[in-house]
Amino acid sequence: MAVENASGRALRVGIAGLGTVGVGVVRLLEENRDILLQHCPWPIEVTAVSARDRRKNRDVDLSKYDWCDDPVALADHPKVDVVVEVIGGASGPAKALIEKAIANKKHVVTANKALLSAHGTALARSAEQAGLALAYEAAVAGGIPIIKSMREGLAANRIEHVYGILNGTCNYILTQMRETGREFADVLGEAQQLGYAEADPSFDVDGIDAAHKLSILTAVAFGCEVDFAGIRISGIRNVSAMDIEYATELGYRIKLLGLSRLTERGIEQRVHACMVPQNALIAKVDGVYNAVVTQGNFVGQNVAIGRGAGQGPTASAVVSDLMDIARGRILPAFSAPAETLKKIPAAPEGSHVGPFYLRMMVVDRPGVIAEVAAIMRDENVSLESMIQRSRSPGDRVPVVFTTHETSQAQVTRVVEKLGKVSAVVEPPHVMSIEQLS
Ligand code: HSE
């Protein structure tokens, strides 16, 4: 079923933002025009564009499109049926444009995970009340069609958990650290020089970007409101080359994962570096690749792997949303209608239970291990293994413990107590071990 639009001939698109993604969308619509015409009832035509600098060379001919200096003007443009928002930012012009577009009865396609993680529920409500699409395949894991997959192909399942590698920059850095034995700061610096990491890398390396994406996946998976504030977030700055070496020795890989699970005590959403068995499917996803794993009660485990960023993958996701609109396939943004999305509380802080890795630097002298082990005993933490093989009397040596099932709260108390032991010379490095397959 084709969408009714004012021209009756084409789905007319206004693009706000002509950076990598916006230009990619223009290029894809031009270069794959024949493919799109084959699949869509009506052609998808760019009619208007907006960006900050009109004179910038973007290696693509924009002269045939109306130019708007103000992106919000696209929401009033008479020859625009769909606004593509690829400006970014959780507020400012991106939010103003989307709100106005919906008010003016224009569909919205966005790649803006920060905005959706802050305002997704409210925007989905207004779009659905107006019978409009709020589509955002590009916002989560770039080229991986995970929103479509969860909202359509897996929609008949009760989703038990969803987790993934949701940030290519972190995955690239961790992969490089493992392959070269170098430290985080060194690899980050090189990644910045090569253009793989931003000049200000904090959104990526501190886990914020992955958490934005996880908050969206959680809403789709569990039919709940988007709850970014409920996510426990840490990044990869504290992962050291030594931890990566120990992980390998213990049979694990270190990955920055976003994990979401519905528990009896609420939704557990976590973004942090963790150890995963080296034979798990996700352990083998290296470099800039993303992966999303879902577990449905009838389908079982489903794994999707692909490029999470870049011009081609992101444009592919944006245009697939445009094709859905051109085909008249307009589904509720978070799969369940926005009015029915549940407000599920976050699981209590520290409630996650699983094995943990603790690596500490201790003074090599008699009785230190006994002191550390006594703290574990007092907190009822059961040890699975211990590695201490360096010998450096009176000097610092690393000691590694892995635990049996332990709660995050127990581990936090252990770490607090270890901080008071004079022989433990720096804060322990702690990572959960996720027993994934
Ligand atoms: N900066 C992100 C990443 C891509 O490194 O995966 C856009 O979200």
Image (cartoon, rainbow, N blue to C red):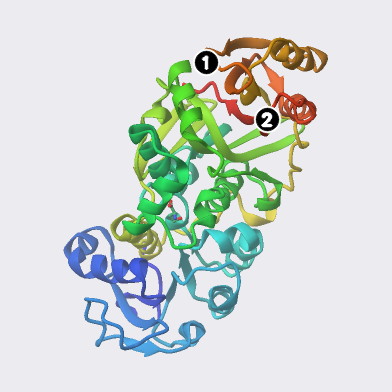
- Let me know if residue 279 appears in the view: yes
Q: Is residue 252 above or below residue 4?
A: above
Between 320 and 311, which is closer to the camera in this rendering? 311
Along the polypeptide, which appears first: circle 2 or circle 1?
1
Residue 218 x/y as whole percent = 59, 44
Element carrying mark 1: loop
Residue 11 x/y as whole percent = 35, 73
Q: Is residue 29 above or below residue 38?
A: below
Q: Is mark 2 within 8 Å of ligand 1?
A: no
Q: Toward which corner of the image does residue 20 lie, by quadrant?
A: bottom left
Between 393 and 49, which is closer to the camera in this rendering? 393
Q: Point out which mark residue 390 bears.
A: 1
Q: Is residue 49 left or right of residue 418?
A: left
Quarter containing the N terminus: bottom left
Q: Residues within 10 Å of mark 1 (few under 14, many from 20)?
A: few
Mark 1 and mark 2 in contact (Cβ < 8 Å)? no
Q: Is residue 148 left or right of residue 126?
A: left
Q: Residue at x 50, y 52 (%)?
A: 204
Between 322 and 301, which is closer to the camera in this rendering? 301
Name which residue type carries label 2: Val
Element carrying mark 2: loop
Name which residue type carries label 1: Ser
Q: Residue furthest front?
A: 394
- The residue under label 2 is 425
Residue 291 x/y as whole percent = 41, 39
Q: Residues within 10 Å of mark 2 (few under 14, many from 20)?
A: some
Q: Toward which corner of the image does residue 326 lie, by quadrant?
A: bottom left
Q: Is residue 392 above or below residue 185?
A: above
Residue 324 x/y as whole percent = 38, 59
Between 144 and 256, which is closer to the camera in this rendering? 256
Alpha carbons under labels 2 and 1: distance apart = 16 Å
